Amino acid sequence: MNLLVFPAPDLAKSKALFRTLLGTDPYVDSSFYVGFRTNGLEIGLDPNGKSAGPIAYWEVDDIEGALKRLLDAGAEKVQDPHDVGRGLLVAQARDAGGSTIGLRSASLAKKR
């Protein structure tokens, strides 16, 4: 299983955001670590983390809808969806801990 750990100084806000992004509840939910498992990947939230965190790009079918759901859950928009070539769209949002979440969608390429 792969693991990505994000700093989460406001653990409650980060947990709500990742619950929305992943569509699942955490399997570990404590004051010092929150862990989600999805499709062979573990996402960890560390309230004591000091780094800006990695940018993990999540494949979504509807990038605009996914970005809106993240913003509605408390994220800040970093980058609107835009084509980076061959119909691949990417967008970015920032969580309460300052980590950047990337979204990508090849839905335009599939429609062509």
Image (cartoon, helix red, strand yellow):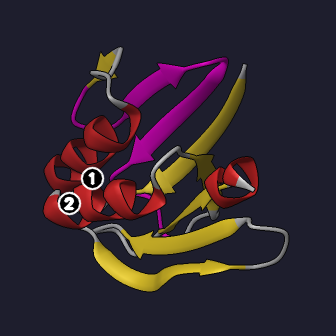
Q: Quadrant of residue 71?
A: bottom left
Vertical arrangement, residue 28 with respect to residue 101, above or below: above
Vertical arrangement, residue 15 with respect to residue 48, above or below: above
Q: Is residue 51 visible?
A: no
Q: Are marks 2 and 1 in contact (CB under 8 Å)?
A: yes
Q: Quadrant of residue 74?
A: bottom left
Q: To which residue does mark 1 refer?
A: 14
* Residue at image location 25% in from the left, 43% down from the top: 15
Q: Quadrant of the C terminus?
A: bottom right
Which callout, 2 or 1, points to the residue nearer the camera? Answer: 1
Q: Quadrant of residue 13?
A: bottom left
Q: Which residues are magenta?
A: 30-51
**Residue positioned most to the right:** 86
Q: To which residue does mark 2 refer?
A: 10
Left or right relative to 83: residue 50: left
Question: Camera-side residue: 68 or 45?
Answer: 68
Residue 26: image location, x then y, percent: 32, 22
Q: Is residue 79 visible?
A: yes
- Mark 2: give few (<14), some (14-19) or many (20+) Cα within 10 Å: some
Q: Quadrant of the N terminus?
A: top right
Residue 4: image location, x then y, percent: 62, 43
Vertical arrangement, residue 45 with respect to residue 56, above or below: above
* Residue at image location 73% in from the left, 65% down from the top: 88
Vertical arrangement, residue 51 with respect to residue 8, above or below: below
